[in-house]
Structure formats: structure tokens, C-alpha cells
Image (cartoon, rainbow, N blue to C red):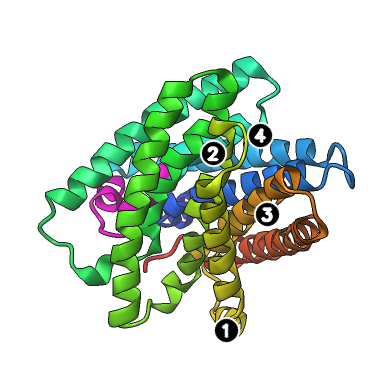
């Protein structure tokens, strides 16, 4: 009887592991983003809150990584299939981005932060080269495949200088920032053309529109870290991010009608990034507007993460995720 029970469990678990998506690392990005948002904007409310959130983010990283390693060992062909998929391919850098975000979360522990940063930066560069080579030498991409997830490999490069500048790796940080910011402009043109002149994104991909927020918001934080202050270009980056935030929130009713998918985690990190950028703007330019806005955004991203976490846990319990598309 025990043997049959074990066999039934194995038959049930295996198919779900096959369909465990690389995009699950977006949950780690979201939790890490919330951690950094509280660290940047909410220190006066819960001084140690970001430490608890950082621990939760790190645990989530370990769990998701272990599941994907298990998938890689047991179902390598499925992993290769994702690496060759025109959309899922772009989520592989979510792994290196998660490492880079955790290096910022634990920046006060220099050895841990530097280790995470070095591994994350190396993997990020390798994945950027792999993804861009796939784009250049493709035989199966069409404009319909272009969507905001294409920014993910770019955003990872822009994150590198946040810890890199803190650790003293100035030229390496400028190297990654240059890659990210230039190709953000190129990809922004392609993605906006696709959104303006072709069919709307499928419901499953609609939350990814929020990824538009991430490059200018993260770019602002990285750039101001690199130059040690604020200038005209920094203002352009921040205000583009703020405008895109206003544009997306003005369509909030449309987003509320979209059912929950794992891709809904695409809401989380970009909103957290705008919150962090606003908190930094408040530190650079005194005034009630940025001071008030950072708390509004912090409240919003906190509620959003609670909603996403509850929805994800319910979907796991009901076995509604890790299923065939």
C-alpha cells in the first residue's frame, strides 16, 4: 500500500515539475524589490522590516532554485525547450537579476554581497550574450513575439552598478550600465512599435506591460549612484519612469480584469523599482511631493505583494500552476 501511495505521488509530482517555469524567479525579484523599497522608503516605520523581508526573499530564492535544478536534472529537454522559446528565453536572466538584487539586500554583509554580485554579474553577462545572439541569429522570431519581457535581459545589466559602485568596481559598473541603457532605448522602440501597430498582448502577457517601468527607474538609481548626485540625464530617467507609471495606473481597470497568472508577478518588481527611485529622488531633492509619493507607492507595492503571494499560494494549493500552456 505504501509503495502504491509513493508511486501515485511520484506520478502526480513529475508532470508538475516538467512545467515548472523559469519565470518563477519573478517571485524572487518581486520580494527582493519589496525588501529594497522598504529599506529605501520605510525605514522610519519598521526599522528592521527589510531584514525580515530580505530573509523571506533569500528563502524564496533557494526554494525556486532547487526546484529548477531538479527540473534541469530530471527534464533537461524541457529546460532546453524554454531556452529556445521566443518568450520564455527572456526570463532566464531573472535568475541572475535575483542574485544581483539579493546582493543589494545584503550589502552591509560585504563578503556575501560581493559573492552574490560577482556570480550574478558573470551569469548576467553570459545570459545577455546568449539572448542577444538568439535574437540576431534567429530563424523563428516575428514582431508578434516582441513584448516587454524583452527588457528583462537589459534590466539585469542596469542593476549591476547599484552594488558594483558601492563595492568600488566603477569601470565594470559603467560597462554594464552602458549596455543596459543603450539597448533599453533600442528595445523600447521595437516594443512600442509592436504595441502601437499590432494586436494587443494576450491576457497572460498583459501584466508584463508594467516591465516598462523598470529600466528608467532602475537606471535612475544606478546612474545617481555612479555620479554621486543628480543631473539632467538623471531627471530624464526618473520622469520617464514616473510618466510610464501614471500611464499604466490610468489603465488600472483594464489590469484588474486580467485573471491571475504567474506572469502577474511582473507587476511587482517594476512598481517596487519606481518606489525605490522615488525614495532616492526624495533624498536628492527636498520637497513634500516626493516625500508623500514614496509612501503612497510603498503602500501600493506592499498591498500588491500581499495579493500576489496569497494568489500564488492558493494556486499552488489548488494545483492551478505548473500546468501545460
In the rendered structure, which segment of residues is drawn in magenta? 77-93
Residue at the spot of label 3: 275
**Residue 305 falls in which quadrant of the image?**
bottom right
Tag of residue 105:
4
Q: Residues within 10 Å of mark 2 (few under 14, many from 20)?
A: many
Q: CA distance from mark 1 to mark 4?
A: 33 Å
Q: CA distance from mark 3 to mark 4?
A: 15 Å
2 or 1: tag closer to the N-terminus: 2
Query: Going by the picture, which residue comes out furthest to the top?
Result: 111
Residue at the spot of label 1: 257
3 or 4: tag closer to the N-terminus: 4
- The vertical placement of 149 against 130, above or below, is below
Q: Residues within 10 Å of mark 4 (few under 14, many from 20)?
A: many
Q: Residues within 10 Å of mark 1 (few under 14, many from 20)?
A: few
**Foreground residue, 296 or 38?**
296
4 or 2: tag closer to the N-terminus: 4
Amino acid at each position: 500500500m505504501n509503495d502504491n501511495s509513493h508511486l501515485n505521488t511520484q506520478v502526480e509530482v513529475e508532470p508538475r515539475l516538467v512545467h515548472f517555469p523559469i519565470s518563477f524567479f519573478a517571485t524572487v525579484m518581486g520580494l527582493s524589490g519589496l525588501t529594497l523599497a522598504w529599506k529605501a522608503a520605510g525605514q522610519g516605520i519598521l526599522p528592521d522590516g527589510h531584514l525580515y523581508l530580505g530573509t523571506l526573499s533569500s528563502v524564496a530564492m533557494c526554494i525556486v532554485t532547487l526546484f529548477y535544478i531538479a527540473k534541469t536534472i530530471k527534464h533537461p529537454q524541457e529546460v532546453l525547450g524554454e531556452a529556445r522559446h521566443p518568450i520564455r528565453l527572456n526570463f532566464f536572466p531573472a535568475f541572475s537579476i535575483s542574485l544581483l538584487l539579493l546582493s543589494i539586500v545584503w550589502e552591509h554583509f560585504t563578503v556575501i554581497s560581493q559573492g552574490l554580485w560577482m556570480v550574478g554579474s558573470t551569469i548576467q553577462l553570459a545570459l545577455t550574450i546568449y539572448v542577444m545572439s538568439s535574437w540576431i541569429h534567429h530563424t523563428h522570431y516575428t514582431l508578434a513575439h516582441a513584448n516587454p519581457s524583452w527588457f528583462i535581459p537589459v534590466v539585469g545589466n542596469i542593476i549591476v552598478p547599484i552594488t558594483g559602485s558601492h563595492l568600488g568596481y566603477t569601470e565594470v559598473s559603467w560597462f554594464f550600465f552602458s549596455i543596459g541603457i543603450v539597448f533599453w532605448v533600442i528595445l523600447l522602440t521595437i516594443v512600442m512599435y509592436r504595441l502601437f501597430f499590432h494586436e494587443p498582448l494576450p491576457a497572460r502577457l498583459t501584466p508584463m506591460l508594467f516591465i516598462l517601468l523598470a529600466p528608467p527607474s532602475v537606471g535612475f538609481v544606478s546612474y545617481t549612484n555612479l555620479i554621486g548626485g543628480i543631473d539632467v540625464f538623471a531627471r530624464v530617467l526618473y520622469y520617464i519612469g514616473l510618466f510610464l507609471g501614471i500611464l499604466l495606473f490610468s489603465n488600472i481597470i483594464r489590469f484588474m480584469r486580467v485573471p491571475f497568472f504567474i506572469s502577474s508577478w511582473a507587476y511587482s518588481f517594476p512598481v517596487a523599482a519606481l518606489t525605490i527611485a522615488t525614495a532616492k529622488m526624495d533624498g536628492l531633492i527636498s520637497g513634500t511631493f516626493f516625500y508623500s509619493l514614496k509612501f503612497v507607492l510603498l503602500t501600493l507595492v506592499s498591498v500588491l505583494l500581499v495579493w500576489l503571494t496569497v494568489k500564488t499560494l492558493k494556486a499552488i494549493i489548488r494545483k492551478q500552476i505548473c500546468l501545460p500552456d
